[in-house]
Amino acid sequence: MKWQSLYSTRRTGDPVRKANNPDQVRTSFQRDYDRLIFSSAFRRLQNKTQVFPLPRAVFVHNRLTHSLEVASVGRSLGKSVGDAIAEKYANESQEFIDFYRYELSSVIAAACLAHDIGNPPFGHSGEDAIRTFFRELDIDTKTAIHERLTEKQLKDFELFEGNSNALRILTNNFNEDEQGGYKLTYTTLASIVKYPCASYEGFNKANGLIATRKSGYFNNETGIYKDIADTLSIPKKEGFETVYARHPFVYLTEAADDICYRIIDMEDAHRLDIVSLEEIEVLFLPFFDEPDGYNSADYIRKKVDSLRDANQKVQYIRARWIGIMTDMLAKAFIEHEEDLLTGNLQKDLLSCLPDKQLQLIKAINDFSFKHIYNYKSVVEIEIAGYNVIGGLLQELMQAILHPEKSKSFKLLQLIPQQFTISNNKEKLYDDIMSVVDFISGMTDLYAIDLYRKITGINIPEIR
């Protein structure tokens, strides 16, 4: 791969002969950001669980606030890396210099906005709930589905992945005539796909490829990603049908997320009195090992001690930690330029840090797993997600498999027109995908409300 070919203003749904961007105020990549932030799919993230249940008396992050903060960090990473590339290749064209110096930050910010847009309700347990449902079908349902779906199509559901769903949401026209979905640039879309492979070749950690740890697109979007890869000269991995090298910009999107959730989940836990200020200091202050100056642990500790409010103390540590990690990971990106361009960097940027920092990150991960991600209310919302999503899938799947039943007719009326249900058994894959599209796009509260109503727990009011 070459820095010169890794960006393009081409968009999904573009005609073969595309006119220049008519917008005299915003660049193509700024328009990507705006299209995302004004979209209904992005807006729905405000009522999707990040870690802790919503709503609560104490405000904690949801998927929307998390995505906005990740975009902020991503913009900084993009600016730092872009400036370094522009400086190193100062003899390249003015268009090249301008993209990396001024536009890369917008690309990464936009990609960060969209990085969780495919996540279903109830966080990662929502993904597991969808997978579990399709893996544990009753005999009759399993027979009906397996007779009409290919093995590759089945993997889209048995290995459902929010990352794959993100590309689908952003590129699918959902029953509208105009093609291209959100019509984002190929550059922004490529910067979102962390695992560039189809479902049936994903979820394979044994081969050592970072691209196949999960999956990046469903069977229906294979052609879309191939077009993106061909346009941006992203090479395919030998011996695979759908596995590509990661686009280098993906590492920056991923790094912004990796930075944010580690400290932000901790900050939320502190607000909920699950984690103490002292525990946060023990975990995060060792990153500041400068003997003196602005980045010394002594300076930061004195600043923390001078603040009165405990939440303000944690916020200060959070701000400083994000700053130092952004600097470290931007430098790691430049240091691994060769491996990034050859597609041979098989670990995230966080894993490229020196051993000392890696041990500190491991301590944060271990602490978070024990004290945050297994906290009682977090586990409760995950269990609720299994029941709610599993229940909705059960009802709607039976409706599309048995449309002749009167209850099925009523249930299918609940699915919005944008999710096409053909009632044609030869198009069962598309009908199942529409059901999954409908459920995965729900907010937590809407999913709970609909589940209660269709199961008779709550009786709907006439309005």
Image (cartoon, rainbow, N blue to C red):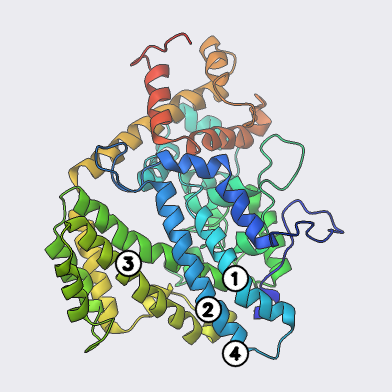
Q: Dot 3: what SS?
A: helix
Q: Earlier in the sequence, mark 1 or mark 3?
A: 1
Whole-number angstrom distance, CA of label 3 to CA of label 2: 20 Å
Q: Earlier in the sequence, mark 4 or mark 1?
A: 4
Whole-number angstrom distance, CA of label 4 to CA of label 1: 15 Å
Q: Residue 345, percent across and down?
A: 49, 78
Q: Nearer the viewer, residue 1 or 79?
A: 79
Q: Nearer the viewer, residue 307 or 456?
A: 307
Q: Is residue 226 above or below residue 402?
A: below
For mark 4, what is the residue?
88
Q: Earlier in the sequence, mark 3 or mark 2?
A: 2
Mark nearer the viewer, 4 or 3: 3
Mark nearer the viewer, 3 or 2: 3
Q: Amino acid at mark 3?
A: Ala
Disc 2: CA contacts within 10 A as few (<14), some (14-19) or many (>=20): many
Q: Amino acid at mark 4?
A: Lys
For this view, does 106 lie left or right of residue 359?
A: right
- Residue drawn at point x = 76 percent, y = 51 percent: 13
Q: Is residue 112 above or below residue 52?
A: below
Q: Dot 2: what SS?
A: helix
Whether residues under marks 4 and 3 lie with C-beta atoms below 8 angstroms apart, the answer is no
For mark 2, what is the residue?
81
Per the rendering, the mark at residue 319 is: 3
For this view, does 453 lie left or right of residue 342?
A: left
Q: Residue 380, percent across and down?
A: 24, 38
Q: Dot 1: what SS?
A: helix
Q: Amino acid at mark 1?
A: Leu
Whether residues under marks 4 and 2 lie with C-beta atoms below 8 angstroms apart, the answer is no
Disc 3: CA contacts within 10 A as few (<14), some (14-19) or many (>=20): few
For mark 1, what is the residue?
104
Decide if residue 199 is in sight here: yes
Whether residues under marks 2 and 1 lie with C-beta atoms below 8 angstroms apart, the answer is yes
